[in-house]
Amino acid sequence: MIIRPVKSGEFFAWYGLYEQYAEFYGTALGDEHAVRVWGWIDRGEHAMRALVAENASGELVGLAHVRGFARPLAGELGLYLDDLFVAPAARSAGVATALIEEASRLASAEGAGVLRWVTAPDNTVARRLYDRLATATEWVTYDRAVAGA
């Protein structure tokens, strides 16, 4: 397995994984939405990047979307792991661990002090892995919808 940045010509392979990720979380993923996100990744907008896991057959079997963020109180930068997904057929083979480890190396190389992500409280399978690789925080996340978005 190879973990690497996604390539510009891999939209459809990326889209297949991203669509499955959206389905996992019960989120509708329209074409316009996917094309917008791909544009952010492909052009490096919003500091958004995608890492992918490629199996021995050259098929993409996992993805991780990451972006940098400032941590003013800490006086440092962080790397945020927005999305992490592994195709069902490739699960339990170390793909998620490899993607997180590569994101951690990327964070370190860029001088970030932390790699951060959130997950659903009932995502118990993933949380078993996350509990081995990182420390759960005591922070509660809030979202407030704003007009014009």
Image (cartoon, rainbow, N blue to C red):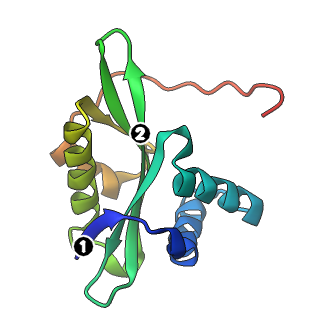
Can you name the residue that lies furthest to the right here? Answer: 148
Can you name the residue that lies furthest to the top here? Answer: 73
Observer able to see residue 138: yes
Observer able to see residue 129: no
- Image quadrant of residue 109? top left
Can you name the residue that lies furthest to the bottom here? Answer: 57
Residue 49: x %, y % from top left: 44, 51
Q: Is residue 95 above or below residue 148?
A: below
Could you tell me which quadrant the C terminus lies in?
top right
The reply, left or right, for residue 109 in relation to residue 63 is left
The reply, left or right, for residue 75 in relation to residue 132 is right
Residue 21: x %, y % from top left: 52, 63
Question: Dot 1: few (<14), some (14–19), or many (≥20) neighbours within 10 Å?
Answer: some
The residue singled out by tag 2 in the image is 118
Can you name the residue that lies furthest to the left here? Answer: 132
Question: Disc 2 vs disc 1: which is toward the camera?
Answer: 1
| Foreground of the two, 3 or 16 | 3
| Amino acid type of the residue that numbered disc 1 sits on in the rendered structure | Ile
At 27% from the left and 66% from the top, the residue drawn is 3
| Amino acid type of the residue that numbered disc 2 sits on in the rendered structure | Val
At 76% from the left and 60% from the top, the residue drawn is 32
The residue singled out by tag 1 in the image is 2
| Foreground of the two, 37 or 96 | 37
Q: Which mark is residue 123?
A: none
SS at circle 1: strand
At 53% from the left and 75% from the top, the residue drawn is 9
Q: Is residue 27 above or below residue 55?
A: above
At 59% from the left and 50% from the top, the residue drawn is 40
Q: Is residue 127 above or below residue 110?
A: below
Q: CA distance from mark 2 to mark 1?
A: 25 Å
| Foreground of the two, 14 or 6 | 6
Residue 1: x %, y % from top left: 22, 76
